[in-house]
Image (spheres, rainbow, N blue to C red):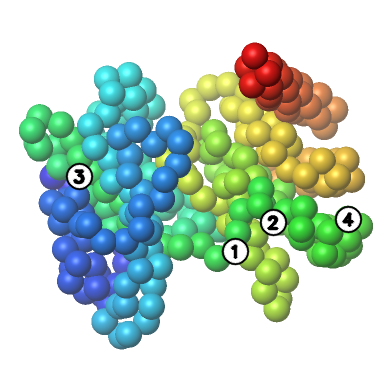
Amino acid sequence: MTHRVQCDESTLVALRDERLDTVDGAFAYGGGDDLHKANLRHRRRTRVDLKDSSGRARTLYMKRYGQESFSDALRRVLTYGWFTSPAGVEFANILAARAADVATMEALICGDDRTWKGHRRSYLIVSEVPGEALERIGQAFIDRHGLESDQVESMTIQLAMLVSHLHRAGYVHRDFYASHVFLDETEDGAELYLIDLARMFHPRWRAFRWRVKDLGQLKYSMPPAWVAKHWDRFLSTYLAGIETRKSANHWGRAVSRRAGRMHRRADRKAAKQQQGEQT
């Protein structure tokens, strides 16, 4: 069994009170609100609201991983090594992202049990990030401030820096859609946070391909008006933050090809679904 703790003492006391400081306690926990999402399979995601020992209300998120399929376990071992559980992977990824100056959640506690009925259970508890996903509020943010406003320009630069910090540290996200970038508007301006780091990894080769995949996912999922107006500024800011021997035009063409394939695949899927509804 392995166990890692990064939270402050007052939060740890609250987790202990709910028995969330152990693998058995985490998997026996019946409180909170489960978050239902497609393709979770052996994973369970739960929102946990509690008060720490100082009376401060905290919203946390717990991920519980049950038995993996053989193929999932094999991919994890080949990518991250034999002795790292699924929850341990994301815990380490969060710490690495924060060390790379990427704004994200806090990794609070993580544990795994390698001997439970011959299978490995693991769980992870993280903090909440403020704001909402760009996928949900990006267009409203643009409409409220104006496509050519300073606020949208600032968000564009901050978004480029978020990606470049991650890539410059040698990591890629592998799921870099607008649904995984949260925007929080404060009195001091908008702040961006990257979430869902379970698939983040450090590619040993073909870094350009992996980076282009991240950028293609982002371009595909951002509001079309923003892409048309601000993508070139985004890309030039991003490229200024990483080391590359390839030209901006080369990057632009590669990312556009990736995003274009995603749009065509989505169009085919929609057409197929519509055809099925008509028959």
Q: Vertically, is 71 above or below 227?
A: above
Whether tag 2 and tag 3 are in contact, CB under 8 A, the answer is no
Instruction: Identify the residue position indicated by label 2 in the image.
Output: 137
User: Residue at label 4?
Assistant: 147
SS at mark 3 in the image: strand
**Residue designated by label 3:** 112
* First in sequence: mark 3 vs mark 4: 3
Q: Residues within 10 Å of mark 4 (few under 14, many from 20)?
A: some
Q: Rounded to the nearest whole Å, what is the CA distance between mark 1 and mark 3?
A: 30 Å
**If you read the primary sequence from the N terminus, does the residue marked by circle 4 or circle 2 appear first?**
2
Q: Secondary structure at mark 1?
A: loop
Q: Are marks 1 and 2 in contact (CB under 8 Å)?
A: yes
C-alpha separation, residue under disc 1 versus residue under disc 2: 9 Å
Amino acid tagged 3: Asp
- Spatial CA distance of label 4 from label 1 is 20 Å
Look at mark 1 in the image and give the residue it sits on. Answer: 131
**Cα separation between marks 4 and 2:** 14 Å
Q: Nearer the viewer, residue 236 or 125?
A: 125
Residue at the outermost bottom position:
54
Mark nearest the camera among 4 and 2 is 2
Q: Earlier in the sequence, mark 1 or mark 2?
A: 1
Choose the circle earlier in sequence order: 4 or 1.
Answer: 1
Does residue 221 lie above or below 275 as drawn? below
Q: Residue furthest front?
A: 279
